[in-house]
Amino acid sequence: MDFEVTPEEQELVDSVRSVLAYECPTTLVRDIVENDSTPEQPWKSARELGWASIDLPERVGGLALGLTALGLVVEEHGRRIAPGPFLATVTQFLPLVCEAGAPHQLQRFAKPAGAGELRGALAVDHGRAAQHETGESLRARREGDTWCLSGESSYVLDGDVADEIAVAARVAGGDGVGLFVVPQGEVLARRVVAFDASRPLAHLRFDGVRVGPDRVLGTPGESSRALSRALERATVAAALECVGACQTLLEMTIEHARNRRQFDRPIGAFQAVQHKCADMFVQVEKARATAYFAMMAVAEDDPRRALAASMAKAAASDCQRLVCEDGIQIHGGMGYTWESDVQLFVKRAKTLEALFGTGQAHRRRIADLLGV
Amino acid sequence: MKLHYDTETEAFRAELRAWLEANQPTLEEMRAAPLTSSAHMPDWARRWQQRLFDAGLLVPGWPPDLGGRNLSPVQQLVYHEEMAKIAAERTANPQGLGIIAPSIRDYGSEFLKERYLRPTLRAEVTWCLGMSEPGAGSDLASLSTRAEVHDDRFVVNGQKIWTSGAHHADHCFCFVRTDPDAPKHQGISVVIIDMKAPGISVRPLPELTNPDHVDFNEVFFDDVVVPRDHLVGTLGDGWSLSTGSLAHERGMMWLRSAERLDRAIGHLLELGRDPGPDGRRIGEDGSFRDAVASLYVDAQAMWFMGYRGFASFARGRVSPEHSVLKLFGSEVSQRAARIATEAQGTDALDVEYESCGYDESFGRLPWMTQYLHTYRMTIAAGTSEIQRNIIAQRVLGLPRR
């Protein structure tokens, strides 16, 4: 296993990091949370610099650099808790379209999304995402050569702001999965009063939404493999964004421990504080290494990819739990305030923990895969 | 980043595997004379180490004139991966091969190299490492074993403790204070002491697992005479031998503990098929399933962190992975054995109970015994608390005071 970041990968990371440092300060995120603003950045930069097409095939205008390159870029977005359509469009919508779509559908949906001209979302059952299943809450019924979607999909990231929703639904009268692309305007979206207001989540109602054959991805009833493969990508990306957010939280905490003085010394000189910081560092290293393995396993289509994706999410879960709790603890009273940026990072990490299966759900999946 | 190495590297792996298949000691010979301490060298172990040396496979990253084959860092990694998979350890005297031989290579005089290097590599002599003292454990630099300096000799007085394998070792690579007036990190020197020299007495310290299980010892020095030419490196510069310079050899020790953890998980999965205290299958218990899955993630993460650390190490960057892996690996290993003992309930108390433990070269060990062994892992070679200090201060840059 070669974890060495190649010079090309490093160059990409450096350029993304410097663009985001400039275009995506924490004040931008805070302005969304406090004033409901809708900044153009950093999506504008992502579009102009081609970040959305990093993992897309060349035939649809992609850079075809692979998931390892995209994963590193997602981690950088996490470091800045970047808002905007990047995560949902690039790591959730696109994977499903690319796994299940026919060539004409890739041209129609993936190409504009990769060019940053289309915003996508992915409606799946987060409660069963770790098991790669869809529940009964959203069903697809065949009506001649069209399909009819009825029911609800909850907690869809960007569900009310995207242009197109990639949907996984249970095929009525069986336990198969059907995959569809639905224009956002055809569903009833209700914005969730979200804990992390910089991440728009919506509940989507499908009141007999008709989907023509040109918007059906693959063959309904036989799409569970494509759903699994897309979920693996989305899960690994969520883990990587979480690692990025935790990395910054760790850095903020260390900075605070160096500067805050009590009893005539920096609090970071106290062993009780040092040991918490060391444990946070270990968890971040663990989660990052595990997520990197997962992105390689998915990128190279290794047989361990499902296990690897669940491990990445479980490790990110362990990491965010400790980094959030101890990060705030070491910040003391200031960490508990609205004005401290710590809260923004904690909320992003907690949101990512809940999406695509919690650590607990993924450990259940790992136990199944290991045959415990 | 990629999962697989190039074909040249994999060709080396295949060659190495074939060689190991033909040359590794058999389980029968290993079990007939099991290793009882970290300096106990039964005949099979000596012959095995000599076969490795003669094939250029004991220290393959070293130059050919020292018995190596100048392997690239990646090939060395592959070498350690394969060595970790076989039952036999690379050497029965890990301190001698892993720490003392490279120290003599890097710091020793021509005389010392001539006299000790090749015999150590060929397992003709064994070593113990005289570091900890009753008053100098985690705070090693406060050691007080004295070596009076004379023109032609040193005279050593004092006491070492936790000296692994001292009752079997031929020589001691000993940290002594040669200048009591210098600041504590200075004034320390390293001398090679013949363990049969007059004035040395060794008192074994059996471990809590079994009164017959001895690796640690107390070693007492009473006017022990050491020839002056047995000084390693410069007088007063011993501290530099105890730090950084050994990182190379420690660099890949994590592979074996990661491999052991993988085996432990295999045995935990077997345990899951057994009936538990309530008569139901242990693996049906939700908390056992969660604990094993969580452990599996951490055990796999050991590998990934090790490989990531290796990637920086191979590029010549200082890597914090050694402390991280030591801390993490020892605590995860402890958790592995604890999960098993808790799942077993009262069956864990019977040390002859047959469904148990890791399959080591000397047979099966009860989980509870294995669990007791893990208490050592979080203490020896730098306690977990010291590892956390190192991470906080040297990696994260938090202030000492």
Image (spheres, rainbow, N blue to C red):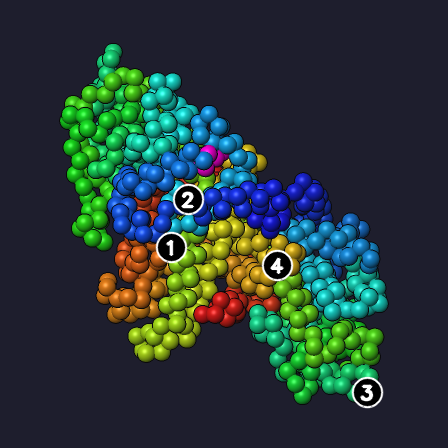
Residue lying at the far top of the rendered structure: B151
Q: Main secondary structure of the magenta part?
A: loop
Q: Are marks 1 and 3 on the same chain?
A: no
Residue B352 occupies which quadrant of the picture?
A: bottom left
Task: Check residue A302 in the rendering and tell me which mark sits there, or answer none.
Answer: 4
Residue identifier under label 3? A144
| Magenta span contains residue A45 | no
Q: Label 2: which residue?
A: B23
Judged left or right of residue B308, residue A175 is: right
Task: Tell me the residue at 39%/72% (across/down).
Answer: B273
* Parent chain of label 4: A
Circle 4: is it few (<14), some (14-19), or many (20+) Cα within 10 Å? few
Residue B114 against residue A22 in the figure, above or below: above
Instruction: Identify the magenta region.
Output: B56-61
Q: Mark 1 highlights which residue?
A: B333
Amino acid type indicated by mark 3: Gly
Sequence-wise, which precedes: disc 2 or disc 1? 2
Q: Residue B53, percent across and down?
A: 41, 34
Q: CA distance from mark 4 to mark 3?
A: 39 Å
The residue at the point 24 percent across, 13 percent down is B152
Q: Is residue A183 left or right of residue A8?
A: right
Residue A111 locus on image (x, y percent):
82, 61
